[in-house]
Image (cartoon, rainbow, N blue to C red):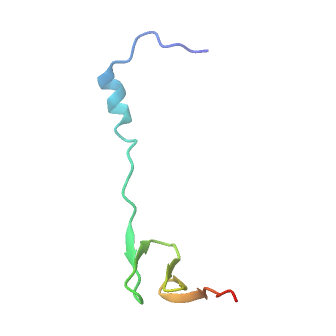
């Protein structure tokens, strides 16, 4: 197995790791309900599942 010949300094290590950061998710607003949701995701609002501003499914009530 390969082993490093020299110790990597903290500065050099941290420079490499600067690209590993979390980004905030993009938030969209539903044109029909005005509800905030993630892009390309369906979301529930008042018992209905919306996708691209249209009702895809309604929640069934159990008897």
Q: How many marks?
A: 0
Position of 24 with respect to 1 (left or right) is left
Q: Position of residue 53 (x, y in %)?
A: 47, 87
Reply above or below: 22 against 52: above
Query: Which quadrant holds the N terminus?
Result: top right
Position of 54 with respect to 12 (left or right) is right
Q: Position of residue 28 (x, y in %)?
A: 39, 74
Tell me where residue 55 sits by quadrant. bottom right
The residue nearer to you, when weighing 33 against 51, is 33
Reply above or below: 57 against 11: below
In the orientation shown, which residue stands out farthest toward the front? 63
The residue nearer to you, when weighing 43 against 5, is 43
Q: Residue at x 54, y 85 (%)?
A: 47
Q: Residue at x 40, y 41 (%)?
A: 20
Q: Position of residue 5 (x, y in %)?
A: 46, 9
Q: Residue at x 38, y 18 (%)?
A: 8
Q: Residue at x 41, y 87 (%)?
A: 33
Tell me where residue 61 sits by quadrant. bottom right
Query: Which quadrant holds the C terminus?
Result: bottom right
């Amino acid at each position: 197995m390969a082993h490093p010949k020299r110790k990597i300094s903290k500065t050099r290590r941290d420079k490499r790791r600067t690209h590993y950061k979390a980004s905030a998710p993009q938030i969209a607003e539903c044109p029909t309900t005005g509800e905030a949701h993630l892009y390309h995701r369906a979301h529930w609002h008042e018992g209905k599942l919306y996708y691209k501003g249209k009702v895809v499914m309604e929640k069934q009530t159990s008897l």
